[in-house]
Image: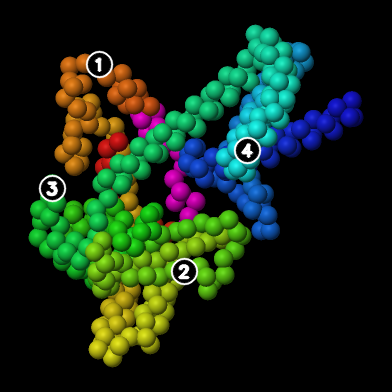
Amino acid sequence: MVIAILAAVVASQAMVTSTFQLLVQVMRLSYFPHIRVVHTSRRFHDHVYVPLANWLLLIGTVVVTAVYNNTTSLGNAYGVCVIFVTFLTTCMLALVALLIWRLPVYLVLPVFLLFAALDGTYLSAVLTKVPEGAWFTLLLALLLSSIFVLWRFGKEAQWAAETQNQVALSASSLSSTTTAHVSSPSPSSVPGLGVFFDKFGDPTRPPPCFTHFVRKFAARPDVLLFFHMRPLDVPVIPDEERYLVTRHRGVVGQTLSNCYTVILRHGYAQDPLRPGIAADLVAQVDLFLNRRLGNTPPADVARVQQEIAALHAASQAQVVYLLGKEAMRVRKLGGKGEGGEKEHSQKWKGRLNVWALTRRLLLELFLWIRDNSRTKLASFDMEIDKMVEVGYLTEL
């Protein structure tokens, strides 16, 4: 009894740790919605705790214990799981040897056939136990795999739509808001500093929230900061290495005055956002401009000094954080996208497009999961009274 209890403790610890690790990895690969992850060590990046997964494991353990009223059925489910893991490991190792290690086929194939024959024999034996309790393992694996594939499919559709809708920023885009849908006068400048959250971090393109803000209000703050956060797999980033400041450029390489891209690199043990983060951003931009001032030709010194004065004046006037509130919907069959292109060609008109219906169903499920999942900014401490959300629509 003592040995059995100790073995169960070791097995449960391995199960919990592996579950947390796999969830973190699939979230990084965009195969699962963002959920809260707590790093429990400042030395080891892999020491994590996922509260939601912990509670789900608790509920799952109770349910499985209640459903399986004998150890034989539970053993059948466990056996199928273990043998499938060994068989898949053999297959994956063969692929790694061929694609990563670049070993010749005549070396990999005999070893693979030997172990595959052994694993296949055991696998064929345990598959006879599927009706006797092993079905639960296969059902759970199918459910989790479906969620992972569904989320990745939805994210790829989201990235493709965002890439198509992303408007390149040039010097003229800050002085004109004429588009295919909206034609408005040149935007006016309002006193203050606008910190636009940018999830792309591309110094040649503006964040979508800025583009839609200018389109809707025909105005822009005097000084623009496009703020991008970049997490790294280390506990702490030194202060002198955390910030990367550049001038924001248009697609043709123009340098825009009073417009900067600030990239904040942070470790998993650091809180990237806190009240008063704008003061740090202003200090970093001021340091960047003063460094440029020392290397600027005499003819451009006055221009850099004006930019420094404009930065301080804008930060003293007011600071506003602007976030994009992206709403998504699935494009209707036969409808037109934002660029005016039809989603389906005329040859599908009047016929049942099975793929289009399947795609719509999958994307609707993806959006439902997305609307009920945790946002990345939910765990950050921000000044609510200085935040403005800019809503915009993306059609998948």
Image-based side of 120 in relation to 212, left or right: right
Residue identifier under label 3: 180
Q: Earlier in the sequence, mark 3 or mark 1?
A: 3
Disc 1/disc 2 C-alpha distance (Å): 53 Å
Q: Please indicate, yes or no, whether residue 388 appears anywhere in the rendered image.
A: no
Q: Dot 4 lies on which element?
A: loop
Q: Earlier in the sequence, mark 2 or mark 4?
A: 4
Vertical position of residue 178 compared to residue 68: above or below: below
Residue 364 inside the magenta-drawn segment? yes
Disc 4/disc 3 C-alpha distance (Å): 56 Å
Residue sitting at x 33%, y 41%: 160
Mark seen at residue 243? 2
Vertical position of residue 91 compared to residue 128: above or below: below
- Badge 1, how many Cα within 10 Å: few under 14, some, many 20+? few
Residue identifier under label 4: 104
Instruction: Name the chief secondary structure element in magenta.
Output: helix
Which quadrant, please, contains the C terminus? top left
Residue type highlighted by circle 2: Tyr
Residue sitting at x 29%, y 58%: 206
Magenta residue span = 363-381
- Badge 4, how many Cα within 10 Å: few under 14, some, many 20+? few
Residue type highlighted by circle 1: Leu
Q: Position of residue 294 (x, y in %)?
A: 38, 87
Q: Dot 1 lies on which element?
A: loop
The label nearer to you, 4 versus 3, is 4
Q: Dot 2 lies on which element?
A: strand
Q: Position of residue 268 (x, y in %)?
A: 57, 56
Image-based side of 41 in relation to 351, left or right: right
Residue type highlighted by circle 3: Ala
The label nearer to you, 3 versus 1, is 1
